[in-house]
Amino acid sequence: MEDEIVEISEEPQLVVESKSLEDEYEQAAALPVIIIPGVQEANIEEVVKADPDCYELDLNHNRIEKLEKFELLTRVERLNLRWNLIKKIENLHILTSLVKLDLYDNQITRLENLDSLVNLEILDVSFNRLTKIENLENLLKLKKLYLVSNRITKIENITMLTNLTMLDLGDNKIKKIENINSLINLRQLFLARNKIIKIENLDNLINIELLSLQANRIVKIENLQNLTKLTQLYLSENGIERVENLTNNLQLETLDLAKNRLKSIENINNLVRIEELWLNDNSIDNWKNLQVLKENRTLKTIYLEHNPVADEAMYRLKLRDIAPWLEEIDATLCR
């Protein structure tokens, strides 16, 4: 009897980003918030005078060109300035109570004038025009740093940020993983869409749980032996030819190797907690190469479409014969 299937969606675009900053501050929902609808340019002075004691000020999407006239804000902890026209970080020195500063999608060319914001825990300057990481040495309480989609060429000047738990440098021009050995509290590291050619210099980051290196120039899985807490590893869109060197990564639950140069599946029998395996868009052409899946009884989801083996008419049935515990094949539920 043929395997019944239920279509749920096309293959999802597995892009690992991390933009839900609000998760850290759910408890703040009851605090005073000023939200300015993005209809026209906001008069910052009038907004501040309306409630100088607010804890959160939302000035997203207001065509603001200059940061100024925040002097009356004595208690503000979260300042949201997404989608504006800001070119320079300035005039924020009085806001020493700030815990979160969001400058996502502006026109900022330099990290500067942040020295007095010593209580800052979340800083987002993604989608700007930065070319360098600098002037963060006083932000020692920083936990999450988002610098996605800038023009940064080197990881530097962050060794003092030892309280960081999340660092997102995706979509820049970085060629080497370096200068992060001191960040021993990192739980999530995002370096997708760069120009990195080698996995290296991660030995001290023993608390990392998520590592994203999608869309780089990596040809070998290596130097992950110390990352024994790793649960999610994203390596799609590289030039990897072999699954290897994951012997110590026994906590892995998600392994993404889509769009590489794999011809076989191997060396995953030790991954006793693996639940999701992304292998679509490779060159796996022999059913013998799939027999290894018999060892992975925790596996729930697998992607193998756009491999030669997936062209066969009985592809799904054969795969279920090998691993009858599968719950989802190529974004289609099994039952």
Image: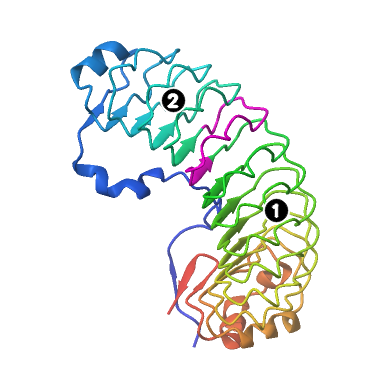
Q: Which mark is residue 237?
A: 1
Which one is in front, 95 or 315? 95
**What's the residue type where badge 2 is placed?**
Trp
Disc 2 from disc 1: Cα separation: 30 Å
Q: Where residue 207 appears, x then y in whole percent? A: 57, 63
Q: Total label count?
A: 2
- Where disc 1 sits, the SS reads loop
**What's the residue type where badge 1 is placed?**
Glu
Which one is in front, 314 or 38? 38
Q: Is residue 31 left or right of residue 96?
A: left
Image: magenta residue range: 125-145
From the viewer's perspective, is residue 37 above or below residue 295? Answer: above
| Residue density around tag 1, few if under 14, some if 14–19, many if 20 or more, within 10 Å | many
Write down the quadrant of residue 208 in the picture: bottom right
Identity of the residue drawn at 59% across and 67% down: 230
Write down the quadrant of residue 14 in the picture: bottom right
- Where disc 2 sits, the SS reads loop
Residue at image mark 2: 83
Q: Where residue 112 appears, x then y in whole percent? A: 56, 23
Q: Is residue 100 left or right of residue 316?
A: left
Camera-nearest label, 2 or 1: 2
